[in-house]
Amino acid sequence: MKINNLDNPLFIVILCILAVLINTFSSVYFFPILLLGILFMGFFVCLKKRYHYSLSLVILTILLIELNNGFKPFSISLLATFIYVFIAPNIKRILSFNTLNSYIYIAVFYFGLFILWSLNNDVSAQLNYTILINLIIDFILFGVFI
């Protein structure tokens, strides 16, 4: 059994507080969804291992980020649940890369987030760059810290 930082409740609390603070303060200058991919992986791990209190904290953090960025309430949480229930088992069944699956889940989550954003608002080049930059930052942070 592989243990990572997302199994630690203290790390989840610090990650949630940090994500809310970063997304609140940076929303003045650009479209911030920083750390949303890592929060998705926290959601994924908490749901998989049945850490209910940590899961509720992650859902609350995602809700605060949704409300700060203009998404509908619980839309990103429903997207994460959809990916966990329907897409992740297919990815796990098709691919045999255990270490690479987390990065694929994050990429699929950001693709779903892009579709969600394009349904509600206009798509621009700045949005594409922002999502791509946030995806790369989440890949780096996930690879280094988790």
Image (tube, grey):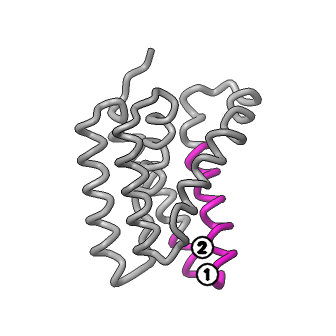
Residue plotted at (43% across, 48% down)? 38
Question: Is residue 10 highlighted in magenta?
Answer: no
Query: Which residue does the numbered mark 2 point to in the structure image?
Result: 128
Q: Is residue 43 above or below residue 64?
A: above
- Residue interval drawn in magenta: 105-130
Residue plotted at (42% across, 40% down)? 143
Q: Amino acid at mark 2?
A: Asn
Q: Is residue 125 above or below residue 96?
A: below
x%, y% of residue 88? Answer: 66, 37
Which quarter of the image is occupied by the N terminus? top left
Question: Is residue 124 highlighted in magenta?
Answer: yes
| Label 2–label 1 contact, CB within 8 A | yes
Question: In the picture provided, is 123 more to the left or to the right than 13?
Answer: right
Query: Which residue does the numbered mark 1 point to in the structure image?
Result: 125
Q: Is residue 47 above or below residue 39?
A: above
Question: In the picture provided, is 45 more to the left or to the right than 94?
Answer: left
- Residue furthest to the top: 1
Q: Secondary structure at mark 1?
A: helix
Residue plotted at (43% across, 42% down)? 42
